[in-house]
Image: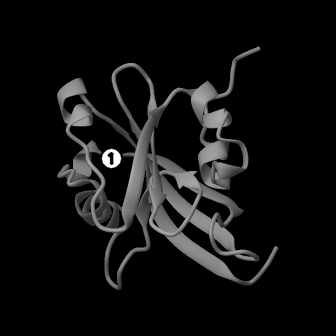
Amino acid sequence: MTDLVVRVVAALVTDPSGRQLLVRKRGTDRFMQAGGKPEAGETPRGALVRELSEELGLDVPETALEPLGPFVTDAANEPGHRLEAEVFRLPLTAGVADAIEPHAEIEELRWCTPSEAEALGARLAPLARLLLPRPTP
């Protein structure tokens, strides 16, 4: 793998029907989980709480974030870079999920079933593809 690393925190946000929230940042064409790069001194949970507030206007306590662990993939928008992501699950109630709107650098958001996310093809970021639920055999 490459020495060029992008470290982020990301939220696997779901609504009561199991759809995942995917976002597209301004100036890009790939859909991914909400999140971003931690600032100096921030914990992963603290960074994600800040990012969710800035990007989606979503205010959640750190305790609402369920750790899924670290994931490593290719970076979506930085060719030749490896993405190291600390991912947390965030299940939302219907009322909260319906109130989310794009803020800051988020240009578009979509609630997607796994098949709708898969249908994005190359527009689905590698981490988002890795986090899609897999059918059980």
* Among the 4 quarters of the image, the one containing residue 74: bottom right
Q: Which residue occupies 50% across, 59% down?
A: 86
Q: Is residue 13 left or right of residue 95?
A: right
Q: Position of residue 126 (x, y in %)?
A: 68, 53
Q: Position of residue 15 (x, y in %)?
A: 35, 28
Instruction: Name the residue tied to disc 1.
Output: 65
Q: Is residue 109 above or below residue 96?
A: below
Amino acid type of the residue tagged 1 in the rendering? Leu
Name the residue nearer the viewer: 9 or 24. 24
Quadrant of image for the C terminus: top right
Q: Which residue occupies 28% across, 33% down?
A: 92
Name the residue nearer the viewer: 121 or 73. 121
Q: Position of residue 132 (x, y in %)?
A: 61, 36
Q: Is residue 16 above or below residue 71?
A: above
Question: Would you call the spot at circle 1 few (<14 residues within 10 Å), some (14-19), or many (20 or more)?
Answer: some
Quadrant of image for the N terminus: bottom right
Q: Is residue 113 above or below residue 7?
A: above
